[in-house]
Structure formats: C-alpha cells, structure tokens
Amino acid sequence: MRMILTLCLALGTTSALAGTTSVAMASSGKPPLREVSQIDDAMLWVALAIEISDKCPEIDPRTLKGLSVLYDLRGQARDLGYSDTEIRAYVRSRDEKARMRARGEKYVKSKGLNPSDPAALCTLGHGEIARSSRIGVLLKAK
C-alpha cells in the first residue's frame, strides 16, 4: 500500500527494521500505537485519503498537507514517549497494514459504499471534500 511508503518517507526512514510492533511496545510499558486513538485514527484518515486518490481519477491528494499531518503525528508519538524505532515498527508492520486496510473498508461500508468500487470511492471522496472532514482536507477535486 502506498500509504506505508509515504509514511516511511515522512518519518525519514530507509533501513529495514527487525522486530514487531508488539515486541517494541511491550518492552517500553506503553500501549501499542494502534491503541493510541489520536495516532491510529489520524493514520486511518491519511490511509483513506491515499486510497481514494489512488482509485478515483477525479480526485488528487493534497500531498504537502498529508506530509504535514504525518510529521505532526510523528511529533505527537514522540511527545507521548515513543521512539523512532517504535514508530517505524508500527508503520512497517504487515499486521498493522492489514488491520488499517480492514478499518478503512469498514469505514467505507459504514457509508453504504463498496470499498472495491472506484466510483464509490469517488463518491466518498467528493462527500468528504464537501464536508471538509479529516479525510476531505487531504484531498482536492480535479
């Protein structure tokens, strides 16, 4: 998923990471980042914006805005005591990628739309843009 590449670039990482999110978090005594709603929910909104812009030819991402959100999330995670290693583990985890995709699909379905239908994602994207939602501010209609 392009989201992960974007997140890794935003976090300034290029090297491979050994270990998993649960291992990195368990040793620190902090909850896994997936359980920190201010981080995990914002990651969902970014992921949905990327998915919509990838699948809908009528909508582009607001790339600089998205990167700004990602840098802010990294800062929030650091302020909460998470190390760059813990943040990278969360971003790169295959389990987290799959979980985030499932959350995104659930969100799209909650709007009565089919997540595998590009036209439905366009409908969702235009609606989010019109509402200036957390997703909509990361998108722009062409």
Image: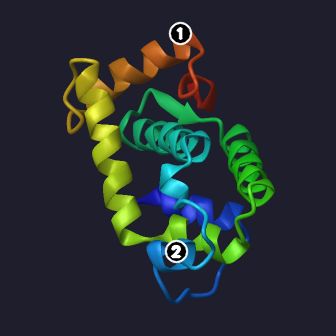
The three-letter code of the residue at mark 2 reads Ala
Q: What element carries label 1?
A: helix
The residue indicated by pointer 1 is 130
The residue indicated by pointer 2 is 26
What label sits on residue 50 in the rendered view?
Answer: none
Residue 35, image x, y percentages? 49, 51
Most distant residue in the front direction: 29
Q: In which quarter of the image is the N terminus?
A: bottom left
Residue 64, image x, y percentages? 74, 43
Q: Is residue 142 above or below residue 81?
A: above
The three-letter code of the residue at mark 1 reads Ala
10 or 63: nearer the eye?
Answer: 10
Q: In this view, does 91 lie above or below 79?
A: below
Is 12 displayed left or right of 102 in the figure?
right
132 or 24: nearer the eye?
Answer: 24
Q: Is residue 119 visible?
A: no
